[in-house]
Image: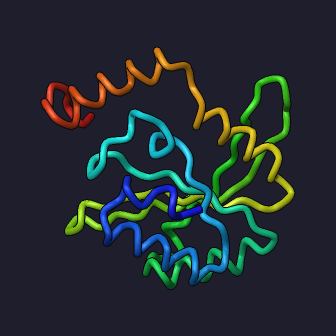
Amino acid sequence: MMEKYKDRLDDYKYNFLLDLQTHLNQELIFFGSINRMDYFKNNSDIDIAIITDNTHSVLFKIQHYLNVDKIDIKKIYQQFNKKNTNIVRGYKIKYKDVDRNFRFDLVVYDEKYRTFVLDNIYKHNTMPILLSALLCILKFLFYKLYLFPKS
């Protein structure tokens, strides 16, 4: 599955994420702009989900592999669908390597939420072409022409 992203990532980022996946022995599920045309190499962040039957073990491995403090692992609650009142709990880690211009958000979910999470990821990965084109234009103006402030 990682092979799909090889041309979207530089060698360092690709190998780093491949090593992370191997170390965790978990599939990294990519979602968001990296799967769409509005991804800008070396500018866009990368969104990754992990769905596991042992969140605590995976979080422990991530904490040590990424060298992040336990306090930097944030518990999150999400409601993906207004019609469905189920609340999905997960853990979010923001990773940033300024020197290599590399950042990603990693969210770890329990296996019991698999259907809700994958349905939401599918929605993030597929959006109307007009909306994707608009996002591309806005991101180009932001990332390449610096017409918008970071705030």
Q: Is residue 138 above or below residue 115?
A: above
Q: Residue at x 55, y 66 (%)?
A: 73
**Which of the image's four quarters has the C terminus?**
top left
Q: Residue at x 45, y 76 (%)?
A: 68
Residue 30 in the image, given as x and y percentages of width and height: 56, 53
Q: Please state if 1 lies on the left or on the right of 112 as rendered.
A: left
Q: How many marks?
A: 0
Q: How is the image coloured?
A: rainbow
For this orientation, the residue located farthest to the top is: 130
Q: Residue at x 15, y 25 (%)?
A: 147
Q: Please state if 20 lies on the left or on the right of 10 as rendered.
A: right
Residue 22 in the image, given as x and y percentages of width and height: 58, 81
Between 100 and 66, the one nearer to me in the picture: 100
Between 138 and 110, the one nearer to me in the picture: 138
Q: Is residue 40 above or below residue 53?
A: above
Residue 79 in the image, given as x and y percentages of width and height: 73, 37
Q: Please state if 16 lies on the left or on the right of 93 as rendered.
A: left
**Which of the image's four quarters has the N terminus?**
bottom right
Residue 2 in the image, given as x and y percentages of width and height: 53, 64
